[in-house]
Image: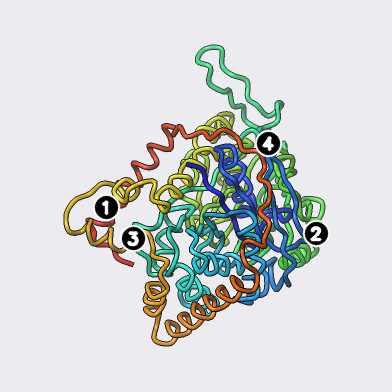
Amino acid sequence: MTYNIAMVCDFFFPQPGGVESHIYQLSTKLIDRGHKVIVITHAYEGRTGVRYLTNGLKVYHVPFFVLYRETTFPTVFSFFPIFRNIIIRESVEIVHGHASLSSFCHEAILHARTMGLRTVFTDHSLFGFADAASILTNKLLKFTLSDVDHVICVSHTCKENTVLRASLDPLMVSVIPNAVVAENFRPLAHQEHVTSPVDGRPLHHSLRPHDTITIVVISRLFYNKGTDLLIAAIPRICAAHPYVRFIIAGSGPKAIDVEQMLERNVLQDRVDMLGPVRHEEVRDVMVRGHIYLHPSLTEAFGTVIVEAASCGLYVVCTRVGGIPEVLPPHMTTFAKPEEDDLVAATSKAIAALRQGRLETGRFHEQVRTMYSWTDVAERTERVYDGISGVLSEEEFYGSSTGEGWSAARGRAGVQSFALIDRLKRYYGCGIWAGKLFCLCVVIDYLIFVFLELWAPRDRIDAVRDWPRKPPLRESSSATNAAIGLGRKRSARYRDQGWEG
């Protein structure tokens, strides 16, 4: 079965980033499998209206006011008329929102449920529970996910975080990781190691004492990305290792702090600041280095470290969030998110590289077998089948027996569209918040009724679809294995009596 799907998020191309790449790659792979996919995002400089990308992917750039970090000003209801018009024109059946901090995402899921559409939410980030910003974000997430059909997280750590933040049943949350197009992140030919004529294994030669080792950092220069850690660590690493240089690509409010650090320590000749780079240029930057340094303070997945490993770089990263789930131990050295430990881990990697103890020659092929956007699309497609009723609840959530399964099925089943049922779900969100949420839903419903009378559906022209490709429905062995692993984890959650 094929679907008409709308991906909704504030974050999309031309802005570079992991969420943007995820939406694009997932959308193109779903199109390859015969589905119709459109993207709804806000207008960027020079991009307003409708654009077509590769593979017939249509993007709606809605001209809304951008408030902070490419996030639109939350208006709750003013997006509804435009959203409804797009949904009806494109005959959308499933609305798939991305990112906890996307205003478009939260508003689209609310409006889609009011219109009687199935909804999916993908969480790409980790958030705390104590500070004011996290409390507000978590309450907003609770509002959105109280009436959503299914949730996808990019790592198991992200799933645990989302389940706790939004008080969800773990059964209605699936883990589908990001992936990488390995062909776009190949090592340079001259960096590939010569193979042994005896066993075919790569021959790794020690670097000479005075050979330069280049450490690459590609990241948004924000606090949560560990820029302060990077600022503290670079002078110490450069002092301890005279033949090490850095390449830093990215932009953000912390860029000026990095430049000030370079001036204070007179390191301009050893640290190259490239500024923002386009996603298609990331590989060209990475292959100039030997080590990739990722000092993030919080990370749900970390697609960039997979891209770095695919380019043949050894990865030094902080042990936070879902990062330990991403790559096997022989590709990484982990550090605590502390200055001393990060410097020590980087020095350890530099020493191992000089001694020829790091076999990076096979990283690219190993990453290719571990991550595939085709597998991600197949597993996402299975979520669509589950919420649309194509799969039975036993098939979707995993076969089980007993009272525990019956109770879980009652909680995690497909959500009802009836207004009274929706209000019941929202009312339980808090003493005051529950009443406010119910008021928002009622107003949204009244706006929907008004729009149905003021702009009837039969007056909205349906667009001509891009020619669809024949659907590819065969599941890969990797997908089946991942589904089996997810069922085992679901069974473990039921056995442990997990409740959101």
Q: Determine the residue positioned at 67% across, 74% down.
A: 73
Residue at image mark 3:
412
Q: Does label 4 or label 3 sit earlier along the sequence?
A: 4
Residue 288's spot in the image, x, y percent? 73, 39
How many C-alpha atoms fall within 10 Å of the one at disc 1: few (<14), some, or many (≥20)? few
Task: Kindly indicate whether the residue at mark 1 contacts the one at mark 4 (C-beta within 8 angstroms).
Answer: no
Residue visible at 63% across and 54% down?
Answer: 90
Q: Do the residues labelled 2 and 3 touch (CB within 8 Å)?
A: no
Residue lying at the far top of the rendered structure: 197
Rounded to the nearest whole Å, what is the CA distance between mark 3 and mark 1?
16 Å
Position of 72 relative to 375 (above/below): below
Dot label at residue 266:
2
Q: Residue at x 54, y 78 (%)?
A: 446
Say whether residue 480 is visible.
yes
Give the structural element (helix, strand or loop) at label 4.
Answer: loop
SS category of the residue bearing label 3: helix
Q: Residue 322 carries which label?
A: none
Q: Which amino acid does label 1 sit on?
A: Arg
Tag of residue 492: 1
Q: How far apart are marks 4 and 3 (CA)?
A: 60 Å
Q: For the residue labelled by badge 2, is the local secondary structure a helix, a strand or a loop?
A: loop
- 170 relative to 433, above or below: above
Residue matched to label 4: 209
Compute the Cα span from label 4 to label 1: 52 Å
Q: Which of marks 4 and 1 is in front?
A: 1
> Which amino acid does the dot numbered 3 rest on?
Ala
- Marks 2/4 in contact by CB < 8 Å: the verdict is no
Residues packed near mark 4 inside 10 Å, few (<14), some (14 to 19) or many (20 plus): few
The kind of residue on which mark 2 rests is Val
Judge by depth and name the residue closer to the eye, 40 or 445: 445
Earlier-in-chain disc, 2 versus 4: 4
